[in-house]
Image: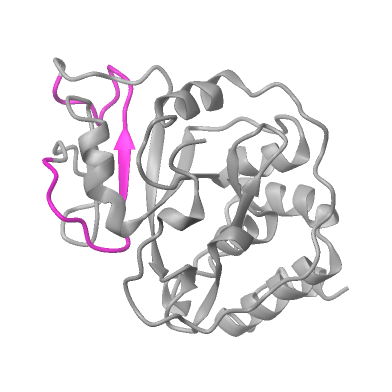
Amino acid sequence: MPGWAVNQLRPTAPPAILQAMDDHLPRPAGTPVPEAVAYVSDLLRDLDSPWFLCGGWAADAWLGSQTRRHGDVDIAVFHPDQGTIFKHFAGWALVAHDPNVPDDTSQPWDGRQLDLPAHVHVPELGSPLSTVKTATHTAFEFEFLFNERSGDDWVLNREHDIALPVDRCARESAWGLPTAAPEVILFYKAGGNLPAAELGEIRARDEQDFAALLPTLGHAQRSWLAESLATAHPRHPWLAHLRS
């Protein structure tokens, strides 16, 4: 799919320390792509930068079917590609969030440079985030989550030098889409990317995805997640399950 090729990544900084994995369990046989995910992936088909299904829908992509209700579709992209995304969705209703604006803003994104951590909502018409009625609106809400990269590596936690090659962080799932790997999904859902001071109570939906995905992890995937999560948050409650 256009925009997925790893060789489109451009070096930006010296590589972070990476932790490799060496096994992956077979993915489920191909299953129908849910309507919301199919809609968003079609919009991204010609995007000239890499993107990856992430969040709860990505967990379902590895499990082979929808396991719970989802609020929107999460798409992981890289921070330097925000200009490409803004150009691709010119004329659309877009609302950007980063440390420089209040989190409850509904101000339309004008293409300004976003600082990490940042995300961009693509709202439906009638959403509280939709303020420009003449803009193009999505049929299913989705969100771009901006991520850091260093050369060919996806930087998962800069503070603790946790990173992986992009082609190990994401692969094609049973839905035929570039999808964040299960262990990477769970690392984010555990708050592994967050400073300890920002780690709050784990959301119920993240607990549900953890319980569903954990049995699908191979030994190396499970070990990597346990080691990386212990590095970022040594007292995380999921460590007991990962080490059992």
Give whichever of 180, 232 is nearer the camera: 180
61 on left or right of 129? right
The colour style of the image is one colour
**How far from the left and from the top, in percent, is residue 203?**
57, 52
Q: Residue lying farthest front?
A: 7
Give whichever of 68, 161 is nearer the camera: 161
Q: Is residue 35 above or below residue 218?
A: above
Quadrant assignment, res 242: bottom right
* Predominant SS along the magenta part: loop
218 on left or right of 50? right
**How far from the left and from the top, in percent, is residue 114?**
21, 56
Q: Residue at x 47, y 74 (%)?
A: 157
Give whichever of 27, 204 is nearer the camera: 27
Q: Is residue 37 above or below residue 5?
A: above
Taking the magenta stretch, the answer to whether it contains residue 122 is yes
Q: Residue at x 63, y 79 (%)?
A: 19
Quadrant assignment, res 37: top right
Residue 238 can be seen in this image: yes
143 on left or right of 239? left
**How far from the left and from the top, in percent, is residue 52?**
51, 45
**How far from the left and from the top, in percent, is residue 63?**
77, 40
Residue 118 can be seen in this image: no
- What residue range appears in magenta? 110-132
Q: Residue at x 88, y 73 (%)?
A: 244
Taking the magenta stretch, the answer to whether it contains residue 113 is yes
124 on left or right of 96? right
Count of numbered badges drawn on the protein: 0
